[in-house]
Image (cartoon, coloured by chain):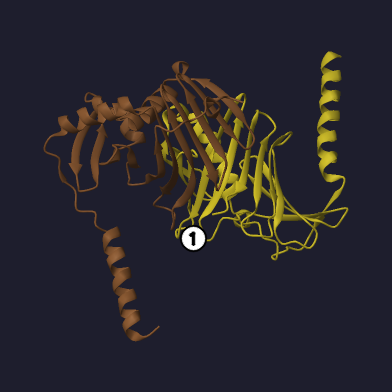
Amino acid sequence: MNKRGLNILILFLLVISFNGMSQTAFTKLNDPEAFKAKLSEMSKSTNSIESNFTQEKNLSILSKAINSKGYFCYKKVNKVRWEYTEPYSYLVIIQGTKLFVQDKNNKKQYDTQSNKMFQELNNFLVGCINGDILNKTKEYQVEYKENNLQFYVKLVPNDKKMKEMINEIHIYFNKKDYSVDRLKMVEQGGDYTNIEFANKKLNGTISDEKFNFN
Amino acid sequence: MKNLILISFLVFVLSGCHFSLFNSYHRVKENNPSLNLNTYFTNPDSNYLYQADIKFMKNYYSGIVAIKSQIDSSSRVIFITEMGIKIFDYEIRNPLKSKDFYKVNYMMEPLSRKIIQKTLANDFGLLLQNANAGNVKYYKDKKEQNIGKVKHHGLRYFYFFDKESKNYNRILIKSALFKKAEVAFSGKEDFPPDSVKITHYGIKLKYAFRKLKQ
């Protein structure tokens, strides 16, 4: 390749990278009620979500994060499959009030109604997915922001015990379809879990078998 | 007469315990400084990550254990669920040197009872203790395999070594009469060990740790 060709290639790559980085800074969302109404409308019309995810657990004592990845799907009403495939295999299925957990050596089924902690975790997870968590204004202080690509919601729990476990929740919603792009849970002391969703498919067909307890 | 029978029975049982351990072992007078009785988790530059299963009675917990040696020779032990939720966070010093060897930085509420905190600290303390700091006595068994013994607070810690290995593969913890617990290490030549198992004899409590490959 001659020098001119090389310059054109570099320019082309730069344009591509700048396009990739074109996310603007977050500013205060002026009309959170309109956003909530639209999110609720989108949530009503979303019957299923399927996505891959990557999870990054950052502990201040470790020099690098613990990374894992897997597959997630949601189907109305209240059916969730949350499956880690790397570097370990771990599966959580939620069907209404029933929770099924399976790892390499063990399978167990729980009734979330008989266990307050599981019930809260269940409500929290499903609430983050369908946006219901934003209506729990008594339980969280909520702050809304936006940029050109995403709505950003920061939730701070009011409950002292919840705060001990998770100090802040950050949810990033995609502006195109109001689906969750990213979920970040920050603990007291700054350790955090960051989950990013990719290859999302909304309203595709998901077999009920994916939510069966085997 | 009844007391005499009881005393004779006790003498018989106690002698049985004594000889069952030491019949096949003989004391070695000279020290063996090449044997390493220190914890495997000493390098402050390393992140030690294990997938962990804890079985207590009918309960089963799984997650990731992160161990990080600190510059001041203490260690941090953090247990999180696969989904990134923190269950506990300890700071542990050498239990053979200090009575108050642990500090709980965080413990999720259902586990925050003192007895659970202490049991967990004692068990993780076994993985993190440096027996070189104690008064070590050395033995050999019939196969000329090395054993190092340390006494501390009424308990005896036996470190078992494969022949010609400087690294122990098992720690047996005994009170005056009974086996209390055992820690088994495998793949120990690849620092840190590939897997670790802790088994209790008095209570139904078991731990299994498998090295997490990132």
| Residue B177 relative to residue A157: left or right | right
User: In which quadrant will I find the C terminus of chain A?
Assistant: top right
Residue B26 spot, x, y in % from top left? 84, 53
Residue sitting at 29 percent across and 26 percent down? A132
Q: Foreground residue, B12 or A98?
A: A98
Question: Which chain letter matches label 1?
Answer: B
Residue A60 spot, x, y in % from top left? 39, 52
Where disc 1 sits, the SS reads loop
Instruction: State which quadrant residue B84 falls in.
Output: top left
Residue A163 spot, x, y in % from top left? 31, 33
- Residue position for label 1: B44
| Residue B79 relative to residue A36: left or right | right
Residue sitting at 70 percent across and 66 percent down? B34
Instruction: State which quadrant residue B144 falls in.
Output: bottom right
Residue sitting at 86 percent across and 29 percent down? B12
- For chain A, the rendered hue is brown
Q: What amino acid is found at the position of numbered circle 1 in the picture?
A: Pro
Residue sitting at 52 percent across and 35 percent down? B118
